[in-house]
Amino acid sequence: MGCHNAARLFREIKTQGYKGKATLVRDYVAALEQRSTPGQLEKERRKRHAFSPNRLSWLVLSRDEKLTEEQCKEVEVLRAANAEVAQAIVLVRNFAQMVRELMPASLDPWLQTAKESELPELCSFAGGIEKDKAAVHAALSHHWSNGPVEAQVQKLKLVKRQMFGRANFDLLRQRVLHRV
């Protein structure tokens, strides 16, 4: 099924205008030879990175009804792996539900449970919430948010950083007020 000689392939595609290096062709051919079925390399890559920090946090914070059957099984694997992990999943999901559904009455019991869990990360998180408990309680009590304002501030800071050292305030004003 085609030529598997990397040197020969490199010579042939170079005559057709390929400007890359021979090592890229050799690595590509080696990867093709290792692949036994179509998509095998992609499946192996997904297996290796199945539990990256981003994926774990997404799995834990997602509602069960929004997860596929396979994703639910992955969460169960996490729960079965360790009692502390299972406890952390319960606490994190309870906190997420409290925030989603704006339940200020649940804050104090959740903080107490988190402190009693003896999970250092959650104890630290609960301690941080305790320091600014009034603000967290207000956030759970009101439906409005200053999120849109913060988004505009972040956009302004991004434009300012992009222009750092290149222009003065007049150009910044032009770019912000007269966006196209």
Image: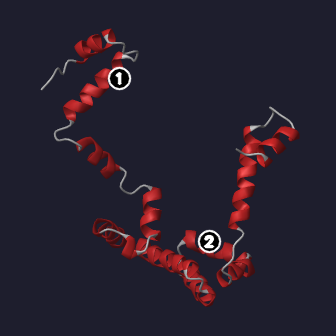
In the image, which disc is placed on residue 125?
Answer: 2
Q: Position of residue 152 (x, y in %)?
A: 72, 57
Q: Is residue 60 above or below residue 16?
A: below
Q: Secondary structure at mark 1?
A: helix
Q: Which residue is mark 1?
A: 24
Q: Position of residue 122 (x, y in %)?
A: 56, 73
Q: Which badge, 1 or 2, comes first in the chain's sequence?
A: 1
Distance of mark 1 from mark 2, alpha carbons?
A: 46 Å
Q: Residue at x 18, y 22 (%)?
A: 4
- 53 relative position to 131: left or right: left
Displayed quadrant of residue 144: bottom right
Amino acid type at circle 1 is: Leu
Q: From the viewer's perspective, is the residue at label 1 or at label 2 nearer? A: 1
Q: Is residue 4 above or below residue 95?
A: above
Residue toward you, 116 or 35: 35
Badge count: 2
Q: Position of residue 29 (x, y in %)?
A: 25, 26
Q: Residue at x 73, y 77 (%)?
A: 135
Q: Residue at x 47, y 57 (%)?
A: 54
Q: Residue at x 29, y 22 (%)?
A: 26
Q: 10 Å neighbourhood of mark 2: few (<14), some, or many (≥20)? A: some
Taking the view exactly as shown, the residue that stands out farthest to the left is 1
Residue toward you, 138 or 129: 138
